[in-house]
Amino acid sequence: MKKEAILYDKLDNSLNCKVCERRCVISDHKKGFCDMRENIDGKLYTLNYAAASSVAVDPIEKKPLFNFYPGSTVLSLGSVGCNFRCKHCQNWNISQADLDEVSLREILPEDAVKLAKEYKCKSIAWTYNEPTMWLEYTIDSAKLAKNNSLKTIYVTNGYMTEEALEIIGPYLDAANVDLKGISEQFYKELCDARMQPVLDNIKRIYDKKIHLEITNLMIPGYNDSEKNIESLVNFMVDEVGVDVPLHFTRFFPYYELKNVPPTAVADLEKAYKIAKEAGMKYVYIGNVPSGTGENTYCNNCGEVLIERDGYQIMADSIKKDQKCPKCGTKADIIV
């Protein structure tokens, strides 16, 4: 569904989109980098309003959000398009696709809210592809969701403009930002993007008191060195907050990086140790079938607060008062 876009300026013979940090200048009857915004006779239109490619009821842990209503379910919605070109994209078949290449279902904001309530979801998440690619739709949906006592979530690459974040921010309860690497070279070579806007938005999201969790996919030979991990952790400790959950996740060969081996579990465990020793309170290891890296521990005494097996919660000792049953320390977890 076409709808006039927001956040654009008119130039002499073109339009300047201000949704993401590419800030595309789009000539008449041309599209921006994401292919989801088109200049039609001097007006910018979003082409994928309410066009859903993916709809699912997920455990909140799958986003991943471990410290935000753990054990609840979320209605996950995805569309088409992205402002990155990641060589390791897990959802390339929708993020790198044209609208006419994907089977789409129209889900208006009121339909999304109805589905979430029907399936007894606590929240709605815009995920699978970059949510700012259908910014107008997520804003309309988030406003309606909040009016219906539903929580709202972005699973994002963090490349929105400050202007876009100012508009969607008041209607977001939580965000998981995929911090893909900690060097400009990594972002340029693997994502065709820049790192600094992502770091800036992570700090902005945290300052806005939107619940924030960070995911870092560790790719062998690209961003898994001890130096890279230390730099990422230092950024979190020094410029964001030690209370922000940090997820190190295992890479598996995919898309254009099929020749890269899976992340060694020992390297994930090393990253976990580096983060904990630097003072990060909540560190997790993902995409590993077994182990204790997905449990939530008391940051004071080490007691297991939430025990997980994959996306399933096996035991939860803080559901009522958010306090450690052993030492009484309050956990930074929304329940």
Image (cartoon, rainbow, N blue to C red):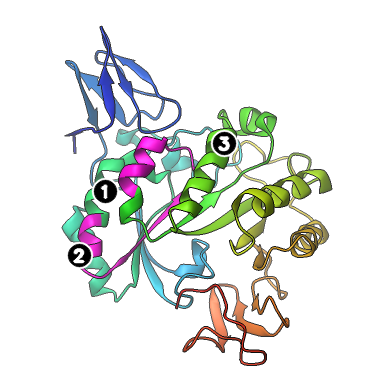
Marks 2 and 1, how far apart at CA: 13 Å
Q: How many callouts does the rendering have? A: 3
Q: Is residue 102 visible?
A: no
Residue lying furthest top: 12
Residue in view at x 36 percent, y 23 percent: 32
Q: Identify residue type, mark 3.
A: Cys
Q: Is residue 152 magenta?
A: yes
Mark yes or no: residue 311 visible: yes
Between disc 3 and disc 2, the foreground one is 2
Locate residue 324: give its quadrant: bottom right
Tell me which numbered mark, 3 or 1, is placed earlier along the sequence: 3
Q: Which mark is residue 312?
A: none
Q: Secondary structure at mark 3?
A: loop
Residue drawn at x 57%, y 36% as measured from the top left: 86
Residue receiving disc 2: 147
Q: Does 109 sit left or right of 198 as displayed? A: left
> Percent x, y for residue 79?
34, 45
Tell me the residue at 46%/74% (across/down). Answer: 334
Q: Is residue 115 above or below residue 261?
A: below
Residue 114: percent from left, percent from top: 19, 66
Residue wearing tag 3: 86
Considering every residue shown, the one lying at the far bottom of the view is 326
Which segment did they paint magenta? 143-168
Q: Position of residue 108 (x, y in %)?
A: 18, 52
Amino acid identity at mark 1: Ile
Q: From what the image shows, is residue 141 above or below residue 46? A: below
In this view, 145 is above or below 307: above
Task: Return the residue nearer the eye: 211 or 256.
Answer: 211
x and y percentages locating residue 12 in the rendered image: 25, 7
